[in-house]
Structures are given as C-alpha cells and as structure tokens.
Amino acid sequence: MGQKYPNFVFVQTDEQKFDPALIDKADVVAINWSCAKHAVTGKARSYARKRGKKVIYAGVGNEKQLLDLLYKECVAPGKQGRETNGANGGE
C-alpha cells in the first residue's frame, strides 16, 4: 500500500525500533491492532497521545475497509474527538 498511497507512512507490524518522529508529521495515526505487535502499537499510541495526534484503532484486514474507516473518521463531516475506536477495535 505504500507505493499506492505515497502520502501515507506505514510502519511494519514488527518494526519496534521505528522512528517516533514519523508521528510528528502525521495528521492521524491509524493503528491496526489485529496484526501489529503490542510493543509497536504501544509505542505509536503513547507518542501520538503526547503529541496530541488523533488516534484511530482499526481491526480491519483489507485495504478497502481501512480506507473506508479513515474516510469515516477523518473526512466525513461532523467527526469530533481526539481518539476513536474503529471497526471492532479500541482499548
């Protein structure tokens, strides 16, 4: 998906040593809890919260579902709040 969506930044599900500064440039942080390791999701979630970034939790397994969730939470009118639980996910 990285080649198809060059404005998105993807962190591999087991990439525990990713640079959290990537989150500084993000408008939204989407965490796919169904396939990412706990250490990766925890690091991303913690850093995003400290930076006041919107966090979306996704439990989806395909591109269309993820894009639909991002649209619903980020583009569709009337959406408010800093954190949103998406598609069977959340804390």
Image (spheres, grey):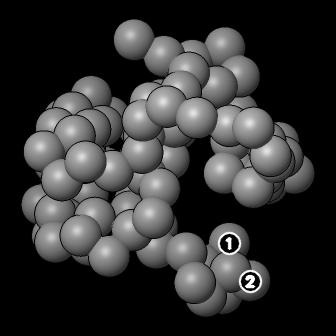
Query: What residue is drawn where x is 13% and y is 45%?
Result: 50
Q: How busy is the neighbourhood of tag 2: few (under 14 within 10 Å), some, or many (20 plus)?
A: few
User: Is residue 89 positioned above or below 35 on the image?
Assistant: above
- Residue 8, by quadrant, is bottom right
Horizontal side of residue 10 vs 80, given as left or right: left
Q: Which residue is mark 1?
A: 1
Amino acid type of disc 2? Lys
Local secondary structure at mark 2: loop
User: Is residue 63 positioned above or below 21 on the image?
Assistant: above
x and y percentages locating residue 71 in the rendered image = 78, 52
Query: What residue is drawn where x is 32% and y is 76%?
Result: 25
Local secondary structure at mark 1: loop
- Residue 65, by quadrant, is top right
Query: What residue is drawn where x is 21% and y is 33%?
Result: 42
Query: What residue is drawn where x is 66% and y is 51%?
Result: 74
Image quadrant holding the C terminus, namely top left
Q: Which residue is mark 2?
A: 4
Q: Is residue 31 visible?
A: no
Amino acid type of disc 1? Met
Name the one closer to the observer, 74 or 9: 74
Q: Is residue 26 visible?
A: yes
